[in-house]
Amino acid sequence: MAPLYAAKGVELRGCPATCALLPDAVAATEEDWSTEYLAPILSIRVVADMDAAIEHIITYSSQHTDAMVSEDYTRARRFIAEVDSSSVMINASTRFADGFEYGLGAEIGIHRQDSCPWPGWSGRAYQREVRGLWRRSYSSVSRR
């Protein structure tokens, strides 16, 4: 996929293992793992196993949307259970993480901070409607 990204002008940044596999990739810094780029930049880290992948997500994720690609149903269920994000997806594009795609309207508030403005609430997706406030978490598993 690296040539496709290059053709589209996407800069690839990676860990040493990534750079060994993709010679045109730039060495990633510690800051890259937690940065949400407002540019066509993709940071790639090769991990040893599922435990390392989940630990990476726990450490660096914004807890907005996280996804994995897998044909293993048991691993997919584990990913959904252990990753604490407002949207957790399996074999689906993270671009589907917005209110319109969920059938909730074009704008849905996503809050993943410790200081939620409503007492007793913490994180997950929420939206203000005429009926008041509600709280919901979404997981998506796609099967081909």
Image (cartoon, rainbow, N blue to C red):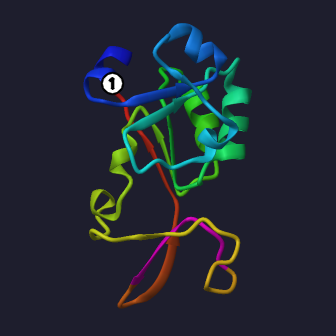
Residue 89's x, y, as percent? 47, 42
- In the displayed structure, 113 sits above or below 76; it is below
Q: Quadrant of residue 103?
A: bottom left
Residue 34's x, y, as percent? 62, 46
Q: Quick check: 118 left or right of 40?
A: right
- In the displayed structure, 40 sits above or below 62; it is above
* One can see residue 82 in this view: no
Q: Quadrant of the N terminus?
A: top left
Q: Residues within 10 Å of mark 1 (few under 14, many from 20)?
A: some
Residue 115's x, y, as percent? 68, 77
Q: How many marks?
A: 1
Residue 5's x, y, as percent? 33, 24
Residue at point 48% right, 84% down? 133
User: Which residues are the magenta region?
Assistant: 121-128
Q: Quadrant of residue 31?
A: top right
* One can see residue 19 in this view: yes
Q: Secondary structure at mark 1?
A: helix
